[in-house]
Image (cartoon, rainbow, N blue to C red):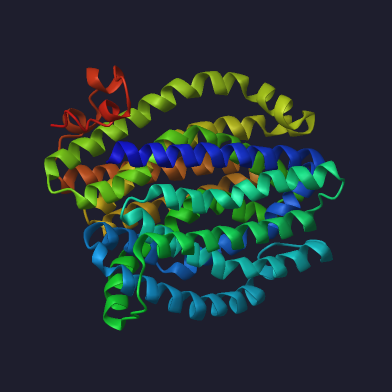
Amino acid sequence: MIARSAKLILLTDVAIILFTMISSLVGARALGPAGRGDLLVVVLWPPVIAMLAGAGLPTAYKYWMAREPERVSRLFSNAIVYTVTVGLVAISAAGVIVPHLVGNRSPEVMTLVRIYQVNIPAALLLNLMRGLLEGTRRFGWAGVARLLSFVIQGPGFAFLWLFGHLTVATAAYTLIIAQTLSTSLGLYAVWREFGPRWEPDWVEFKKSMHYGLRDYPGTVADFTTLRLDQLMLGAMASNVAIGLYVVAVRLSEMTTLATDAIADALMPEVAASQEPKRAESLCARSLRVAIYMHLILLPPLWLAAPYILRILFGPGFVPATSAFRWLLVAAGVWSCGSIVINSLRGFGYPGLSTLARFSAAVVTALALILMLPRFGITGAAIASLVGYAAMLVIALTGFVKKRQLNLWRNCLRPERRDVFFPNWRSLLGLSSAR
C-alpha cells in the first residue's frame, strides 16, 4: 500500500513542481527580483497563520483516520465548526499583527497583504480535509485537491504575462482564486468518498486535540525550521534579496520530491501496521533510500548551479548561486529528517518528534541571528542546514532508543536490495521486509 501511496504523492509533487516552475519562471521574468520579493511578502503569512490556527488537528485527523476511519462524520463536522470560528478569529488577528511583521513596504504591497489574509480559513479547511483523506490513504484525492491550486496558478500567471497584465496585484488575486477552488475540491472529495453525516461531537474534538496538541509544538517548530529564513528575510531584507532567495529555495526543494513522497506515505502506513518489526524495517529502508537519492543528485547540481539559475531565470538571479548550493545540501538533510519524523509519528511518539523539531527551530533561529546579518542569503541557507541537521540527529537518536534498534545495523548499513530494485515495491521492501 505504501508503494502505491508514495507513487501518488510523487506524481502530485512532480506536477506541482512543474506548475510552480511555470509561475516562478514567468513571475521572475515579468516582475524581476524586486517584484518577486514583493509577491512573497504578500503571500508569506496566511499559510503560516492557517498552520498555527490548525493546532495540530490535521495531523491528528490523519492519525485517527488511519486507525479508526469510522469516526469520519464526527471529525468532518468538527472541522467545519472549527474552521468557521477559528478562521474568522485568525483573519482578525492577522489584520492587526501581520502588517508589523513585513517591514517597510509600499502602500500597494501593504494593501495586498491585508487582502490576501482572506485565504486563511480556506487554507485551514483544506489542511483538515487532507488529513481525513490522507489518513485513509486516499492520496489521489488529497493530491488533486492540493494540485488544483498550482494548476490554476501556473497557467494563470502565464496568461496574464502574455497579455501584459501580470503584476504583484493580479498574481495575488490569482492565488486567492486558486486557493478557494482547491479547498472546494477538497470538501467535495471528502463528501464523495465518505458521505459524512452532520455529527459535531465535543468528546471527539477533545480526543483529537489531545493528539494534535502533543504534535502541535513540533508542527510549529517544523514550519519554523523550514521557513524561518524566509520569515526573517521578509522582515529584514530588501525585496531584491528576498526575490533571489525564494528562487533558490524553490529550486532546491525540487530535489526532495521523491523522498518527501515516501515520508508522507510512511506515517499512516506505520500507524495502521500490525507488525512492528516490519514497520521498523520499512522506516529504515526509506531513510537509506533518501540518503542514496541525495548523494546522487547533489554533485551535478552543485557544479551546475550558476548555469541553472542563468538559463532558467536570467542573469539577474545568478547571485543566488551560493545560497542555492547550500540549500541543496540542506534539502537532503531535511528529507532524511522528515522520514524519521514521520516514522516517530506513525509509531505514536508525537512528543518525541516535537522535541526534535522544536530543538531544530531554536538552533535555526540562533544560527540566523548570527549569520543572516553577516552573510546575507548565503548565511540564511547555512543556518537552515544547521537547523535541519539538528532535527535529524535528535529524531534519529530518539527513534533508535524508543524502538531499541542499533543505529548502524538496523538503520544505516547499506543492503544490496536497497540499490538493485526493479520497481517501487522492492524499493520500499514490501515484499521482503524483515
Q: Is residue 433 left or right of residue 351?
A: left
| Whether residue 180 is situated above or below residue 260 in the rendered picture | below
| x and y, in percent, of residue 432 in the image | 16, 28
Q: Quarter of the image containing the N terminus?
A: top left
Q: Quarter of the image containing the C terminus?
A: top left
Q: Is residue 45 left or right of residue 268?
A: right
Q: Is residue 125 left or right of residue 310?
A: left
| x and y, in percent, of residue 179 in the image | 60, 59
Going by the picture, which residue comes out furthest to the right? Answer: 164
| x and y, in percent, of residue 24 in the image | 69, 41
Give the residue drawn at x 32%, y 72%: 73
Give the residue drawn at x 79%, y 58%: 169
Give the residue drawn at x 68%, y 34%: 320
| Whether residue 284 is situated above or below residue 73 in the rendered picture | above
Q: Is residue 262 visible?
A: no
Between residue 353 and residue 63, name the one nearer to us: 63
Marks counted in the figure total 0
| x and y, in percent, of residue 189 in the image | 44, 59
| Whether residue 78 is situated above or below residue 144 in the rendered picture | below
Give the residue drawn at x 46%, y 41%: 386
